């Protein structure tokens, strides 16, 4: 069931998602060679609590941390640990918050020091693909319009879109209807309506789109070892466009 949010609900979601974007800024400052992903996790959790929110991922189906920290060939859901970042890594940080019962969710990919040209392109294409999706997110259009805009842009640039994980509605739960795939046909799927809040989150692979789950039961990695990038915004559908809620 798709829920439309009232103005009061949207105000709470604006705050939860603003805090997500503030955590991104903190992560960009702190993510340097030599720093562990566990350290980033602790800093993110402290910050989220200081801003009056709760971490949304911790405890979600038993997930053990505040952020997901996915490095290089890790696609999403990397568990923070003792890994020390090194020059040339690309780090995806996914952040979830809860404020007064409403969720924020968003992700960015950060280059660590100087990275290979192809990996910088992967990051840029993924960020742009998300923005292409947001550009067609407005009342009257359909989910498939978003999916197609993302897939078309990614594949035109020589990369591939992960099929096994998708974006989602968001609000009083982290994952609500509808699903928002990053691949598909224009004109298909649910119609977008004013007051819908959705998280769009393209996961883009350098090589093939195949992924598998590591033995920890969480970490998603590419099958072929190619690198992967991930960007995610939570947005509000309006009559004539979308408002990005994950924003400072
Ligand atoms: N942004 C991710 C998602 O929407 C984060 C989920 S991580 C989890 O699925 F640990 F909470 F599962
Ligand atoms: Co999400």
Image: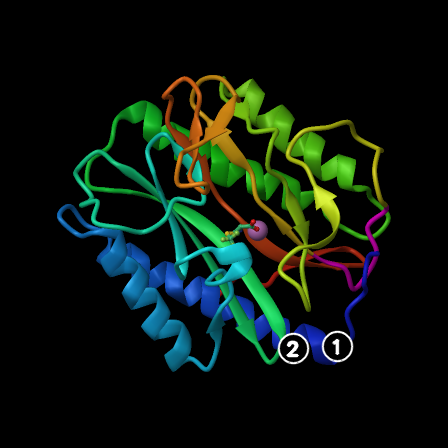
| Residue 138 x, y percent position in the rendering | 77, 51
Instruction: Give the residue at x 75% y 77%.
Output: 7
Residue 46 visible within the image: yes
Instruction: Give the residue at x 41% y 17%.
Output: 224
Q: Which mark is residue 106?
A: none
| Residue 177 x, y percent position in the rendering | 76, 52
- The answer to whether residue 115 is above or below residue 36 is above
Instruction: Give the residue at x 41% y 67%.
Output: 22
Q: Which residue is mark 1?
A: 7
| Residue 172 x, y percent position in the rendering | 68, 69
Give 95 or 191, whichever is nearer the viewer: 95
Q: Is residue 69 magenta?
A: no
Q: Secondary structure at mark 1?
A: helix
Q: Check if mark 2's residue and mark 1's residue have beta carbons within 8 Å.
A: yes
Q: Which residue is mark 2?
A: 11
Give 185 or 86, whichever is nearer the viewer: 86
| Residue 221 x, y percent position in the rendering | 42, 31
What range of the chain is rendered magenta? Answer: 191-197
Mainly helix, strand or loop, the magenta region?
loop
């Amino acid at each position: 069931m798709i829920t439309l949010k009232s103005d009061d609900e949207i105000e709470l979601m604006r705050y939860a998602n603003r805090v997500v974007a503030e955590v991104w800024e903190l992560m960009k400052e702190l993510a340097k060679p030599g720093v562990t992903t566990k350290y980033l996790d602790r800093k993110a959790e402290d910050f989220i609590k200081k801003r009056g929110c709760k971490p949304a991922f911790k405890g979600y189906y038993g997930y053990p941390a505040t952020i997901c920290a996915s490095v290089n060939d890790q696609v999403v859901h990397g568990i923070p640990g003792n890994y020390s970042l090194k020059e040339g890594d690309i780090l995806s940080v996914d952040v979830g918050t809860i404020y007064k019962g409403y969720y924020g969710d968003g992700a960015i990919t950060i280059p660590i020091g100087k990275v290979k040209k192809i990996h910088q392109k992967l990051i840029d294409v993924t960020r742009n693909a998300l923005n292409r999706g947001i550009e067609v997110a407005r009342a009257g259009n359909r989910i498939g319009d978003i999916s197609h805009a993302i897939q078309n842009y990614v594949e035109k640039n020589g990369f591939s879109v992960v099929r096994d994980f998708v974006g989602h509605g968001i609000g009083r739960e982290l994952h609500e209807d509808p699903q928002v795939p990053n691949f598909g046909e224009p004109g298909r799927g649910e119609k977008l309506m004013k007051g819908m809040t959705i998280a769009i989150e393209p996961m883009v692979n350098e090589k093939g789109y195949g992924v598998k789950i590591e033995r920890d039961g969480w970490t998603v990695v590419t099958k072929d070892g190619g690198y992967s990038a991930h960007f995610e915004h939570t947005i509000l559908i309006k009559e004539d466009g979308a408002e990005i809620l994950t924003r400072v």
